[in-house]
Image (cartoon, rainbow, N blue to C red):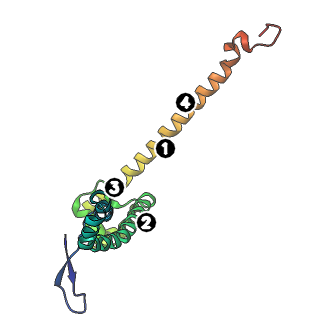
Amino acid sequence: MVRQVSRGRALGPGPTHTVFDPFSINPIRRSLGAIVVSAAMLYAPMRLLGAEAGGLVLVGVGWLAATVLIVSVPVLIIATVEELWRQVRCRLQPPIEELDLSPRVLRLLHRYGLHTIAAVERVDEATLMLLPNFDARARHEVLRAISLRRYAAEQRAWEAERERDARRRRVAWKTAQLPMRLTRRFSDRSGRR
């Protein structure tokens, strides 16, 4: 809930102060909740309490509800776009978290800028071994996880092809049997089939 604001590299490490950020954790849900509550605070008093009492409530807290509404709508839009972009990016370039790797190897790969599976696949084994703290065990773990992922993808493709082939054969068999199954109603006018 409280985010640390750092001074930057020029001034040295360490926070200068803390900033209260209500949208730092789960911004979509929180901004949507703030919008609903603010809209209810603006709409409900006039509808439920009448004109005079509703006007007094709006004068008292209406400005606060309008301010929260004005701040929350852009946060909701930006957070939704960011989440959609993250989903598309993860779909196109899966992150290395999808591999079955130990936390140590995941941290090492992130530290050296290898955030996607495609980026790890582009790096050859010798380059992996040149990375500091990246030993033969970590290299073996990465290569094993990538080969297992490739094998699983091939298995899914084979199963999908097998299912399409079986479906194609069923359709061909049903269409080949169709003329023998026709009832008298579908035969020609002479009664012959």
Q: Which residue is mark 4?
A: 166
Q: Amino acid at mark 4?
A: Ala
Query: In the depicted view, which residue is nearer to us: 23 or 104?
Result: 23
Instruction: Using the numbered discs, state the Cα–Cα distance from disc 2 to disc 4 in whole angstroms.
Output: 37 Å
Looking at the rendered structure, the secondary structure element under dot 3 is helix
- Please report contact status of discs 4 and 1: CB closer than 8 Å, yes or no: no
Q: Amino acid at mark 2?
A: Arg
Name the spot of residue 105 as percent of width and height, x first: 26, 63
Q: Which residue is mark 2?
A: 122
Q: Which class describes the residues within 10 Å of circle 2: few (<14), some (14-19), or many (20+)?
A: few
* Rendered view: 95 above or below 164: below
Q: Which residue is mark 1?
A: 157
Which of labels 2 and 4 is toward the front?
4
Q: Amino acid at mark 1?
A: Ala
Query: In the depicted view, which residue is nearer to us: 63 or 4?
Result: 63
- Residue 52 visible in the snapshot: yes
N-terminal-most mark, 2 or 4: 2
N-terminal-most mark, 4 or 1: 1
Looking at the rendered structure, the secondary structure element under dot 1 is helix
Instruction: Using the numbered discs, state the Cα–Cα distance from disc 2 to disc 1 in whole angstroms.
Output: 23 Å
Instruction: Using the numbered discs, state the Cα–Cα distance from disc 2 to disc 3 in whole angstroms.
Output: 17 Å
Q: Amino acid at mark 3?
A: Glu
On-image quarter of the C terminus: top right
Instruction: Using the numbered discs, state the Cα–Cα distance from disc 1 to disc 3 in whole angstroms.
Output: 19 Å
Name the spot of residue 27 as percent of width and height, x first: 30, 65
Looking at this view, name the residue that lies furthest to the front: 52
Q: Which residue is mark 3?
A: 98
Q: Which class describes the residues within 10 Å of circle 3: few (<14), some (14-19), or many (20+)?
A: few
**Residue 35 lies in quadrant:** bottom left
